[in-house]
Image (spheres, rainbow, N blue to C red):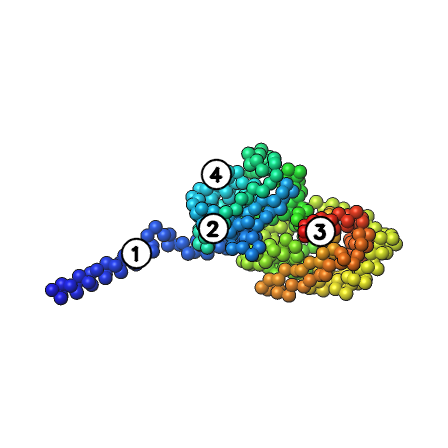
């Protein structure tokens, strides 16, 4: 009897061991861990955390206000919580959101499906696989905060007819694999056009000015085409890679929304993907618009601006506007300084800024605010001077421009 009992125990233990060994693999793709890791990287490339994580909130739990010209939209909870997140969604519903801007209702393009539609089905499903592994958070977000009539989602059908072309990215024959990979990232998952392409009065992309700069959130996202004066024409591929990886290069320092993009997303891209994106961007033709006539150095605004610049700016940016490489950006020939709209320049003079801190370049230098010291006419003068000193030439900035920027900044900070 003892022997029979022992045999039974051994068989039972063996059966349990087999069951335990087999259970974790039942219905699970052997490549699942690779898929999840790949999805995590792709979610980082798409910068999902920037919108879907509220300040001080749990990752991907939503609630962050996304500013649009028509009001704010709150980013959705995309954790796997089944009641308030996307845990109950099927893969088809997730693909509908990514590729069509539609789940059980039409989405607003604050969720950049206009660009994500170019993402391959596999990449989108890998992102879903990763999101399924994050902490489920119960956070019921009412995304639609728009005023009437923009809160009527049915209107998005007409908007989509005007501005949305569904479909995956198609590699171009005659272009290198690197260039096509860069195009896939820039035009698709990286959704660079969401910030850097100007919008129509209805909020759709102005296709005639693709990636040639756009005002948003009190900043000006600059031209990132190959334009020689206002774009990346003076940047090399290596300059672009360094900027996206570290937040600084020999010409410029990232701040504002781009600082967040670099901190959350591009500093984590692989070097190959950064080089691919840079290669693609360098190939894009700019408008190559001729520079406006330079404002004469004896103009009263230029003379006043020079005095202010020497007194308050030259210590960091240099008397000749040459700055300090990788610390304080050069102003002579700086495409952001020469941008069509001086929005960002006015903002940093009025409110100051802090550069991004990255793993590769953690210094994060800051520029102090001068809005409390300078009146609107003085702000306009120094910005006009910077835009027309040394080798620069750009339109003048008026006291009304400075006043408007100050008012907008005060309203934003309230």
Q: Nearer the viewer, mark 4 or mark 1?
A: 4
Q: Earlier in the sequence, mark 4 or mark 1?
A: 1
In this view of the protein, can residue 312 be seen by the observer?
A: yes
Marks 2 and 3 sit apart, C-alpha to C-alpha, by 34 Å
Position above or below: 148 against 55 = above
**Neighbourhood count class around disc 1 (C-alpha, 10 Å): few under 14, some 14–19, many 20 upward:** few
Q: Nearer the viewer, mark 1 or mark 2?
A: 2
Q: At 82% across and 59% down in the image, what residue appears?
A: 308
Q: Residue furthest left?
A: 1
**Is 368 in front, or is 259?**
368
Marks 4 and 1 sit apart, C-alpha to C-alpha, by 37 Å
In this view of the protein, can residue 206 be seen by the observer?
A: no
Q: Which residue position is annotated with label 2?
A: 138
Q: Which residue position is annotated with label 3?
A: 410
**Neighbourhood count class around disc 2 (C-alpha, 10 Å): few under 14, some 14–19, many 20 upward:** some
Relative image position of residue 312 (x, y in whole percent): 79, 62
**Is 108 in front, or is 176?**
108
Q: Which residue position is annotated with label 1?
A: 22
Q: At 36% across and 52% down in the image, what residue appears?
A: 28
């Amino acid at each position: 009897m003892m022997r029979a009992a022992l045999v039974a125990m051994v068989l039972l233990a063996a059966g349990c061991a087999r069951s335990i060994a087999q259970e974790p693999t039942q219905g699970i793709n052997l490549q699942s861990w690779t898929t999840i890791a790949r999805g995590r990287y792709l979610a980082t490339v798409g910068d999902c955390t920037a919108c879907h994580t509220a300040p001080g909130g749990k990752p991907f739990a939503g609630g962050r206000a996304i500013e649009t010209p028509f009001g704010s939209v709150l980013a959705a909870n995309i954790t796997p919580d089944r009641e308030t997140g996307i845990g109950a969604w099927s893969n088809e519903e997730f693909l509908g959101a990514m590729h069509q801007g539609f789940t059980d209702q039409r989405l607003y393009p604050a969720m950049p499906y206009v660009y994500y539609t170019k993402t391959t089905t596999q990449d989108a499903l890998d992102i879903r696989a990763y999101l399924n592994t994050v902490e489920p958070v119960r956070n019921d977000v009412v995304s639609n905060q728009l005023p009437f009539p923009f809160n009527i989602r049915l209107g998005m059908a007409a908007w989509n007819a005007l501005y949305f072309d569904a479909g995956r990215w198609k590699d171009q024959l005659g272009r290198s694999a690197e260039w096509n990979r860069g195009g896939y990232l820039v035009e698709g998952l990286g959704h660079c056009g969401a910030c850097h392409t100007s919008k129509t009065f209805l909020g759709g992309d102005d296709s005639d000015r693709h990636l040639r700069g756009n005002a948003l959130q009190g900043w000006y996202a600059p031209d990132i085409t190959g334009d020689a004066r206002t774009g990346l024409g003076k940047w090399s591929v290596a300059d672009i890679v360094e900027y996206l990886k570290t937040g600084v290069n020999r010409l410029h320092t990232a701040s504002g929304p781009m600082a967040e993009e670099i901190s959350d997303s591009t500093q984590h891209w692989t070097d190959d993907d950064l080089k691919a994106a840079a290669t693609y961007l360098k190939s894009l033709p700019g408008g190559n618009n001729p520079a406006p006539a330079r404002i004469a150095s004896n103009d009263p605004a230029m003379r006043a601006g020079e005095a202010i610049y020497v007194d308050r700016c030259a210590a960091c940016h240099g008397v000749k506007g040459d700055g300090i490489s990788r610390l304080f950006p050069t102003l002579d020939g700086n495409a952001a300084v020469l941008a069509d709209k001086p929005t960002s320049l006015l903002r940093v003079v009025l409110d100051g800024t802090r550069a991004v801190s990255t793993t590769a370049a953690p210094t994060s230098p800051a520029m102090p605010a001068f809005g409390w010291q300078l009146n609107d006419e003085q702000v306009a003068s120094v910005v006009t001077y910077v835009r027309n000193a040394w080798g620069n030439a750009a339109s003048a900035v008026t006291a009304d421009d400075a006043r408007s920027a100050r008012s907008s900044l005060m309203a934003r900070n309230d």
